[in-house]
Image (cartoon, rainbow, N blue to C red):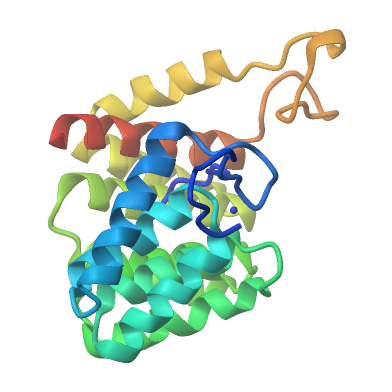
């Protein structure tokens, strides 16, 4: 699921004749991704009413960090089908990754999706994460608790509990955070191993070798960072299994 990957995974499509596609961050686009986008673009141009193809086009653009193109594609899809929940989910993700759109704009697509499908677990999970990022903690808690009730898939349920654990830890509610973490471990015992593995991989090296993960507070990442990284690692593990 797209929902908890907090990694930074951004300018239109070029013909790939004597040039390289580049993301909005200025990096050359991976050739495989560039070919996928080119094929999807050609197909969408020939089949403009194919909503599934437009959704995949939007997804591919976002994953390639061609965010503004992805937003445009998804907005076109939503104009074709105003009740397309998957498109709203991806549009919210695109807004969160955009370098020029205010983060608060990511809320609106999710709230619309929630009105269309009130019982959609993924919508509530995403709302919980967006509200948390924007420090709208009461709304975040409400959405994540609702996700706990709705999620019937193991990976989603674990993610909801870990989301609540991170939320409570951020607010200094350590007992509640521990309870949610333990609940996640009950559902999936591999959570504890994933946390330990992530902590070992992300222990900060000496200052001569530090990178983006360096924390001046000490050698270890904060509990909030550990939970975030664990959510990512667990989600990737489940994605590998599902594939």
The answer to whether any part of residue 77 appears in the image is yes
Q: Is residue 163 above or below residue 124?
A: above
The answer to whether any part of residue 132 appears in the image is no
Q: Give the left or right position of residue 6, taking residue 104 as reference.
A: left
Q: Position of residue 159 (x, y in %)?
A: 34, 49
Q: Position of residue 202 (x, y in %)?
A: 60, 20
> Residue at image x 23%, y 35%?
238
> Residue at image x 85%, y 28%?
216
- Residue lying farthest to the front in this orientation: 17
Q: Position of residue 34 (x, y in %)?
A: 43, 42
Q: Position of residue 54 (x, y in %)?
A: 29, 69
Q: Is residue 28 above or below residue 22?
A: above
On the rendered image, what quadrant is the C terminus found in?
top left
> Residue at image x 40%, y 84%?
111
> Residue at image x 23%, y 83%?
118
Q: Give the left or right position of residue 209, taking residue 191 as reference.
A: right
Please identify the quarter of the rendering in which residue 164 is found: bottom left
Q: Nearer the viewer, residue 66 or 227?
A: 66
Q: Is residue 7 above or below residue 102?
A: above
Marks counted in the figure total: 0
Please identify the quarter of the rendering in which residue 234 is found: top left
């Amino acid at each position: 699921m797209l929902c908890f990957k907090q990694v930074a995974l951004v300018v239109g499509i070029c013909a790939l004749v004597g040039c390289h596609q580049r993301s909005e961050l200025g990096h050359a686009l991976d050739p495989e991704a560039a070919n996928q986008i080119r094929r999807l673009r050609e197909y969408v141009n020939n089949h403009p009413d194919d909503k599934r193809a437009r959704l995949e086009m939007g997804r591919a653009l976002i994953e390639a960090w061609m965010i503004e193109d992805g937003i445009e594609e998804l907005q076109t899809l939503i104009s074709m089908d105003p009740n397309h929940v998957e498109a709203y989910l991806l549009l919210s993700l695109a807004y969160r990754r955009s370098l020029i759109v205010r983060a608060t704009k990511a809320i609106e697509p999710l709230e619309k999706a929630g009105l269309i499908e009130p019982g959609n677990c993924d919508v509530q999970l995403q709302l919980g994460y967006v509200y948390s990022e924007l420090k709208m903690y009461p709304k975040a808690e409400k959405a994540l608790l609702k996700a706990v009730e709705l999620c019937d898939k193991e990976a989603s349920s674990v993610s909801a509990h870990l989301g609540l654990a991170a939320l409570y830890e951020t607010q200094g509610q350590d007992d509640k955070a521990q309870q949610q973490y333990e609940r996640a471990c009950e559902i999936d015992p591999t959570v504890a191993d994933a946390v330990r593995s992530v902590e070992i991989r992300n222990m900060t090296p000496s200052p001569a070798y530090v990178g983006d993960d360096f924390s001046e507070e000490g050698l270890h990442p904060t509990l909030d960072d550990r939970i975030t990284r664990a959510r990512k690692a667990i989600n990737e593990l489940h994605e590998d299994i599902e594939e």
